[in-house]
């Protein structure tokens, strides 16, 4: 039963929250209709969102990058993923957010907010 509950998709289940470890490339697999990826940025890195084969059109992904005020380069990688959109170059003071939406027609994660927002 626990495995079934972990695969229930939002809004019937809870949104998925992923916290990948800091690495040169972060490539989480997105299966839920609402997912938040929270990742630290202690080095330059590439972000490559991967879609589960059953991901539904219009699914949202919010990426939150956290770190302490040092300039970092975050690139959007298409290696083994279908992510499109701008990367981030510069200083992340506390947290930066980026939103992506899965486009089932193009089979790609498309940036919904072209400017990184810092909070």
Image (tube, rainbow, N blue to C red):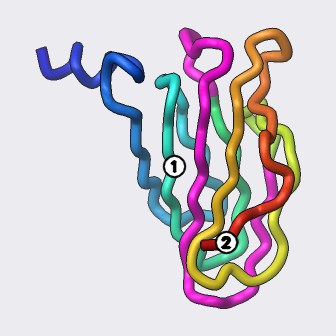
Disc assigned to residue 118: 2
Quarter assignment of residue 11: top left
Q: Is label 2 in a helix, a strand or a loop?
A: strand
| Residue 55 position within the rendered picture, expressed as x and y whole percent measured from the top left | 57, 15
User: What quarter of the picture does the C terminus occupy?
Assistant: bottom right
| Residue 70 falls within the magenta-colored stretch | yes
Q: Residue furthest left?
A: 1
Spatial CA distance of label 2 from label 1 is 16 Å
| Residue 21 position within the rendered picture, expressed as x and y whole percent measured from the top left | 45, 61
Magenta residues, as a range?
A: 51-76
Q: Which residue is mark 1?
A: 37
Question: Residue at point 49% right, 57% down?
Answer: 38
Q: Does 55 sit left or right of 87 as displayed?
A: left
Q: Can you say whether 58 is above or below 64 in the image?
A: above
Mark toward the start of the polypeptide (2 vs 1): 1
Q: Residues within 10 Å of mark 2 (few under 14, many from 20)?
A: some
Disc assigned to residue 15: none
Question: Residue at point 73% right, 34% down?
Answer: 80
């Amino acid at each position: 039963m626990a495995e079934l509950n972990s695969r229930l998709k939002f809004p019937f289940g809870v949104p998925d929250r992923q916290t990948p470890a800091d690495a040169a490339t972060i490539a989480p697999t997105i299966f839920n209709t609402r997912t938040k990826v929270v990742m630290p940025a202690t080095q330059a890195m590439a972000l490559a969102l991967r879609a589960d084969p059953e991901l539904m059109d219009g699914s949202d992904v919010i990426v939150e990058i956290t770190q302490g005020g040092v300039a970092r380069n975050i690139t959007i990688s298409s290696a083994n993923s279908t992510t499109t959109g701008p990367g981030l170059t510069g200083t992340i003071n506390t947290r930066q957010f980026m939103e992506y939406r899965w486009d089932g027609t193009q089979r790609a994660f498309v940036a919904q907010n072209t400017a990184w927002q810092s909070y």
